[in-house]
Image (cartoon, helix red, strand yellow):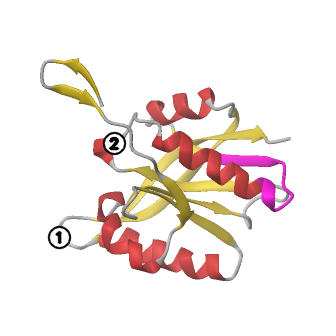
Amino acid sequence: MSLLSAGAAEVVVRVLVRDLTPADLSACAWSGSATHLVQVARELERAAAGEVDYLAVCTPVGLPVAIGGVDYQVAVGAGTLWQLGVLPALQSCGLGTVLIRAAEDRIRSRGLRRAELGVEESNPRARVLYERLGYVAYGSRPDAWDVEAPDGSLRRYETMCTLMRRDLS
């Protein structure tokens, strides 16, 4: 620990990247609504079938602080990163970079040499991260999914995404 200023200290915490498990879902409420977590649970079933990897960056006590998936069924010859998220209080601490690099390692381990993702055009902060990590925009497409309102009802969320990719060779 080092003193940064009166009352402030720097703390370094080791993290572990592992597969997300169904037992982790209750600790991932920060990543989205109950409807979102149901979708993540479905993706964990796909992970068990080998169609996707779903990763968790965890604290030393196993608490997930960043999660995200790699889908191998979307683009031929590539792994598609999706549902990437970092605990809001820990954003801009490097956890997203750790998550993305681990996802890229998983893609490489399957013999694939390209990672792809879509980033909402309304999320320039994420796009800056992806560009810093070597992702290049190559197109755009509309996307949509259901989101849960505070009253539990569902509504369709529509957005435009910039498509990005990175050569992993």
In the visual, does 154 lie left or right of 99? left
Instruction: State the image coordinates of residue 114 (x, y, percent, origin top left).
Output: 79, 47
From which residue to which does the magenta span run? 108-117
Badge 2 density bin: few <14, some 14–19, many ≥20, Cα 10 Å:
few
Question: Image quadrant for the N terminus?
Answer: top left
In the visual, does 45 lie left or right of 166? left
**Residue drawn at (70%, 74%), measured in percent from left and top?**
51
Res. 44 image quadrant:
bottom right
Give 85 or 74, whichever is nearer the viewer. Answer: 85
Amino acid type assigned to the residue bearing label 1 in the image? Asp
**Residue drawn at (17%, 70%), measured in percent from left and top?**
151
Q: Secondary structure at mark 2?
A: helix
Disc ID at residue 25? none
User: Distance between the Cα atoms at labels 2 and 1?
Assistant: 28 Å
**Residue drawn at (74%, 39%), measured in percent from left and top?**
166
Res. 157 image quadrant:
bottom left
Q: Is residue 5 magenta?
A: no
Q: Which residue is mark 2?
A: 90
Residue 57 position (above or below residue 149): above
In the visual, does 141 lie left or right of 24? right
Q: Which residue is mark 1?
A: 151
Furthest toward the left, the residue is 7
Q: Earlier in the sequence, mark 2 or mark 1?
A: 2
